[in-house]
């Protein structure tokens, strides 16, 4: 894989056409055009909370209802958003590579699922997915596309202000279908390690001949 970034468009097209193994790294900027909040920089707040303060295991243990309201808000936006031109272009190019016998992989920091919704198949989600939950007890991981994920979260998650609403009891928060314990979003929070399987697959970057960063 070339270690030098390409700034010449003609040369880039040549390298892209000839590369047999391609990896595309995507970040929050790709989904911003679809209306997905990036929660970074000035104004990156949900209510009066910084997203970085809510996206921790400590926050979930302290106030699981608040954290679930935040993620209900994020899930609702993601589930009702659509892939933009960037998502669609990457999905199309993956299809072209497949037809030509070339390998193509997307490694994304995004958790919104829009790459897959656009039709991309070979996607590694470094930071997890809003479409999945994991049990805090038995660790079962399952896909859950219900919106709201539980009745207690219906109408909650307004990002603009703290509403004068009662705190949701833990017993009313999303439960594991296997053991009925509390589940949490399947998201890699601050201070946590990446999924070993995803990390292992992503770390094989030396096998790729061309890396493209789209942030």
Image: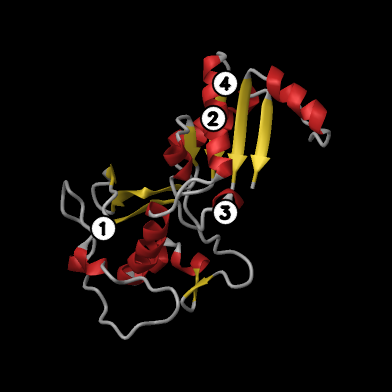
The kind of secondary structure element at disc 1 is: loop
Q: Separation of disc 1 and disc 2 at Cα?
A: 32 Å
Q: Separation of disc 3 and disc 4 at Cα?
A: 25 Å
Does the rendering let one see residue 1? no
Which badge, 2 or 4, is on the more N-terminal residue? 2
Which x, y percent locates residue 176? 21, 51
Q: Separation of disc 1 and disc 3 at Cα?
A: 25 Å
Q: Is residue 194 above or below residue 5?
A: below
Which badge, 3 or 4, is on the more N-terminal residue? 3
Which badge, 1 or 3, is on the more N-terminal residue? 3
**Residue under pointer 1:** 149
Foreground mark, 4 or 1, reads: 4
State left or right for residue 139 relative to residue 53.
left
**Residue under pointer 4:** 97
Q: In this view, does 193 lie above or below 170?
A: above
Q: Is residue 162 above or below residue 35?
A: below
**Residue under pointer 3:** 33
Q: Are marks 2 and 3 in contact (CB under 8 Å)?
A: no
**Residue under pointer 2:** 92
Quarter of the picture holding the N terminus: top right
Q: In this view, does 156 lie above or below 121?
A: below
The kind of secondary structure element at disc 3 is: loop
State left or right for residue 109 relative to residue 213.
left
Which badge, 2 or 3, is on the more N-terminal residue? 3
Which x, y percent locates residue 50? 52, 71
State left or right for residue 134 relative to residue 94.
left
The image quarter in which residue 208 lies: top right
């Amino acid at each position: 894989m070339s270690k030098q970034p390409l700034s010449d468009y003609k040369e880039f097209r040549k390298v892209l056409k000839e590369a047999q193994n391609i990896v595309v790294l995507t970040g929050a900027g790709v989904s911003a055009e679809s209306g997905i909040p990036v929660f970074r920089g000035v104004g990156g707040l949900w209510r009066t909370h910084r997203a970085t303060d809510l996206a921790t295991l400590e926050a979930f243990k302290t106030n699981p209802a608040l954290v679930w309201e935040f993620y209900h808000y994020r899930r609702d936006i993601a589930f009702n958003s659509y892939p933009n031109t960037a998502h669609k272009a990457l999905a199309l190019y993956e299809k072209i590579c497949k037809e030509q016998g070339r390998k193509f992989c997307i490694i994304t920091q995004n958790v919104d699922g829009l790459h897959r919704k656009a039709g991309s198949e070979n996607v590694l989600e470094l930071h997890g997915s809003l479409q999945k939950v994991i049990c805090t007890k038995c660790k079962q991981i399952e896909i859950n596309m219900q919106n709201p994920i539980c009745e207690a979260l219906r109408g909650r998650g307004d990002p603009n202000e703290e509403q004068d609403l009662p705190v949701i009891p833990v017993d009313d928060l999303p439960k594991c279908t296997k053991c009925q314990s509390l589940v949490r979003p399947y998201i890699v929070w601050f201070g946590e390690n990446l999924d070993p399987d995803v990390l292992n697959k992503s770390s094989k970057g030396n096998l790729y001949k061309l890396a493209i960063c789209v942030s």
